[in-house]
Image (cartoon, helix red, strand yellow):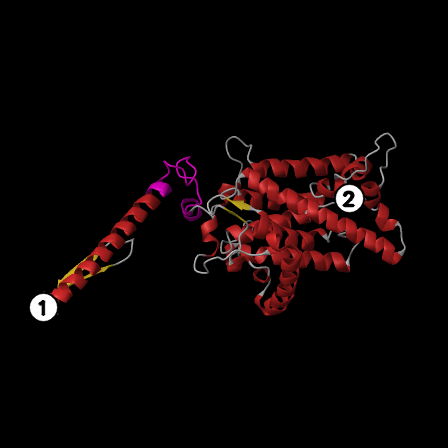
Amino acid sequence: MDYSSFLPDGNGLSGSNILGGVVCLGSLWHAVMPVFVDEAFALVPHHTVFTPVPVIPVPFFWNLLTAHFFEGHLVEALITVPWVVALARMLERLWTPKALAFHLLFTAILTGMGVFVYELMTVYRTHSHYAFFAPVRGCVGLVVALAVGLRHAYPFEALPLVPHSWGLQCQHLPFALAAFISTVGFLFPRWLPEWPFAPLAFFFGWLHIRYLMWFPYGDSHGDHSPEFTFESMFPRPIRPLVSCCGAIAYRVGTSCCSGFVKLREVDDTLGHAIMYDPAKATDLEVNGGIRPGTADSPSQREYDARRAKALQLLDDNINALLAGEVVASSGLPVREVSWAGAEGVELAVRDDKDL
């Protein structure tokens, strides 16, 4: 992969650059004014329930979302910002800025609500008020949500910012990140208090793509293909256990809200390829300043030419077979017609008397 594609483009206003700028500026602001930023934008359960400022009668419910967009330490920001920009820039090749924004907002809000409930349960279980007032913030959920998007869009592409010799692909990233962050956070909660963001973003990111995301090319909400089941997000040894738990959850979901949970019938041979424009999915780089998939791009012209050639060959083959059946029924010599694909177009015609 050419990593120059992850560098800022000419206008510098892409969604990945804006996202990276928000995370970078938020982290710098926290480094300068840590108390104010934590009180106003970090996930503090007390502030989500009760307003900390008498002048503002509304609780700080927005901290469920804003806690995902800045780091508590500049060292963590230096590690996460390049990953946020690189992963978002890869998704921009197939996703629109609107689709990327909806995916991140949906995942961040539901993840924040999950962590909020988890903190309340911790306070109830331990009878300690520390978790009720402790700020939680970090971008680990943001990175995992982007990784889940890459798992769907480019499952077999090499990871960015990682040597190709390692053989790591985008399909390995979401589970690896969620498992690593959860393990470190569970063993050392003081070092990584925001660790619950990772497993919840892993689930809610998959949930958004599976059921809610709009795919214009497929003209449908959600990717219901068998290639994007929840167990497919896990390593193969533990997939049977996840599949069993997922089947139980699916049955419960269909009995409660079948209109949302019930899957469509999808052709197993197509997979989720129908969710993206083939012209964009096959050519991932910019050709002469023209984005792939546009009417004037070389990839679109090549795709249209191959498609027309294949359809013409298929039509000729069907006509030849029909003509052969008529000739065979009349007792005349049969002409055998074969064709070889859409790439190297080749027709072979021969009489049965030459065999």
Name the kind of residue labelled 1 in the image. Answer: Lys
Does residue 292 show up magenta in the picture?
yes
Where is residue 179? Give x, y as percent: 66, 59
Q: Mark 2 vs mark 1: which is more N-terminal?
A: 2
The label number, if any, that marks residue 174 in the structure image: none
Residue at label 2? 43
Q: Residue at x 66, y 43 (%)?
A: 78
Q: Is residue 299 above or below residue 243?
A: above
For the stretch drawn in magenta, what is the main secondary structure? loop
Where is residue 325? Give x, y as percent: 18, 63
Q: Residue at x 57, y 67 (%)?
A: 236
Residue at label 1? 353
Q: Is residue 25 above or below residue 2?
A: above
The magenta stretch is 278-301
SS assignment at label 1: helix
Q: Quadrant of residue 44?
A: top right
Q: Is residue 334 above or below residue 223?
A: below
Q: Residue at x 40, y 37 (%)?
A: 294
Name the kind of residue labelled 2 in the image. Answer: Leu
Q: Are marks 2 and 1 in contact (CB under 8 Å)?
A: no
Q: Residue at x 57, y 53 (%)?
A: 210
**Which image quarter is the C terminus in?**
bottom left
Using the numbered discs, state the Cα–Cα distance from disc 2 to disc 1 in whole angstroms. Answer: 83 Å
Does residue 277 show up magenta in the picture?
no
Where is residue 135? Give x, y as percent: 80, 45
Q: Would you say residue 71 is visible in this rendering?
A: no
SS assignment at label 2: loop
Q: Would you say residue 12 is visible in this rendering?
A: yes
- Picture mark count: 2
Q: Quadrant of residue 170?
A: bottom right
